[in-house]
Every structure is written in C-alpha cells, then in structure tokens.
Amino acid sequence: MTSSPKISILMSCFNSEETIQKSINSILQQTYDEFEFLIMDDNSTDNTLNIIKENAKIDTRIRYFKNENNLGLTKSLNKLIEHSKGSFIARQDADDISLKKRLEIQIKLLKSSSNRIVTTRAVNIDSEKIHPGFSYYLPKNFVIKYKNPFIHGTLMIEKSLLINMGGYNENFYFSQDYKLFYDCLAMGYKVPIIKKVLYKLNMKDNLSNKFKNEQKYYSDCVRKNILPNKLSH
C-alpha cells in the first residue's frame, strides 16, 4: 500500500465536446497515479457529459457530477472541493493538456519543501509562446499588483489551505483564480512557478477571450481589494 498523498484533480466543463477527451487523456496518462479525477459538467447542451460518462466506465478514478443549472466555474469548483478526498487539490481545464510528469513534479516539490501551493509554466498550444514569459523573472508580489502571473490550470494546493481560505470566493464569477492567488500572497504564502513547462494552454475561444470586459472588471476588483457588483456577469 503506497503512502503517497492522494491528489484530487478538479475539472469543470461546459460544452467542451471538442477538447475534453484530450484533456482527460492527459490526466489519465500521468506518471503519478495516486489521484481521483472529479469532473463537473456545468449543464452542457452538447455531448460533453456522454464523453465523461464513457471515460468513467473505463477508469474508476473518474467521479463525475452534473449541475442542473449553469453555475459557472467558481461555484462548480467549490462543489467539487466538497466532494474531494485528497490531501491536495489540483486543477485541469477542459481545453488544456497536462504533460505526463506534471503531477509527479508538482507533488515532489510540495512534499520536499515548506510550500503549500505551486503552479507551473505553460505553453500556448497554437503560438508555442511560454506563459508566464518575462514576468516569470520578476517578484510575484510585484507582478500580482498589475496582472495574474499564474496559470490556473496548473494549480496544485494543499486542500487544508484552500479550505481555510473558504475555497474560491463566490463573489468572483470571473477571475476567481486571480483572487485566490492574490489572497495567498497577501497572507504571506509563497507561490512558486516551476520553470519547466508542464502544461499546454488553449488561448483560442477560452473564457478570458470570450468575456474580456467581465474579466477586466473582476480583475480590477481583485487589485482594488473590493467585492464585485453581483450583477456584473
């Protein structure tokens, strides 16, 4: 019986039938396999849920859930956190790909250091540009004042820390990851970014591009340390 800490990987998806199979495969093919894979279908209207169900039949590490109404990413992730059993929480987006050693490298860093949270760099699937780029070399406490230097899909965090923070702040329908990272740094936690690229990022037709104005508004609220107007989405 292994003593490796179990990771709960959280994915929330909405109408992701074109990309979700590759994303699921990238988790199931990880070199570190002590995990459960929790997937929330956020009331999709396409074939997303059926794809998830077929994968769950093949791999028992997958546990899936369905929202009766479209709740958005923040609330969906909090619901998955409630169902999670792992000591660590990791994220995966339904249109991105984790490289095979991502979980292995991240959990090794958390187990061998005092860090309680870690992210990695990612490469744009289309342009092959690495994120974060130049800002990777700047102090995170400086960069966070202007933009989010962290890739949400690469997050791995101690579940106890996330729970103590109250999970994701549900006042933030968008930019919930920026708020989480901002608060972690404000509380004095270091958020290392592994230099090695361990994630492939889709930046075409993703949430950030589809809702630029909303993202900007919520990001401004993070920087100003104020709560958003609930009607802003």
Image (cartoon, rainbow, N blue to C red):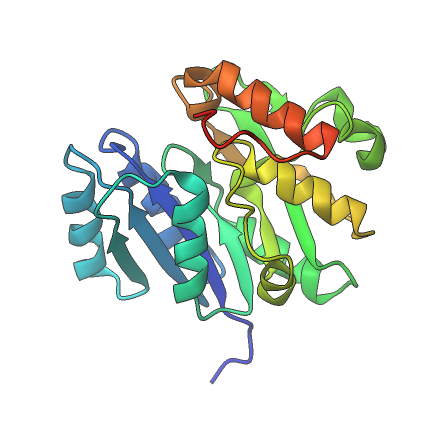
Locate the C terminus and report the quarter of the image it occupies: top left
Q: Is residue 80 above or below residue 50?
A: below
- What percent of the width, then of the height, locates residue 8? 46, 61
Report x, y in % for residue 25.
33, 46
Furthest residue to the bottom?
Answer: 1
* Location of residue 15 (image quadrant): top left
Residue at left offset 57%, top offset 31%: 228
Image-based side of 185 in relation to 208, left or right: right
Apparent side of residue 45 relative to residue 136 in the rendered image (left or right)? left
Q: Between residues 2 and 139, which one lies in front from this camera angle?
A: 139
Residue in view at x 56 percent, y 42 percent = 154
Q: Nearer the viewer, residue 87 or 164?
A: 164
Residue 205: x and y, percent?
38, 18
How many numbered marks does the figure carry? 0
Residue 72 visible? The answer is yes
Query: Which residue is at 73% across, 28% downward?
Result: 224
Residue in front for this viewpoint, 54 or 220: 220
The vertical placement of 77 against 204, above or below, is below
Side of 72 relative to 3 (left or right): left
In the rendering, at what x and y percent does residue 134 appear?
76, 21
Q: Is residue 194 visible?
A: no
Q: Is residue 48 above or below residue 29?
A: above
Q: State the image quarter where residue 107 is shown.
A: bottom right
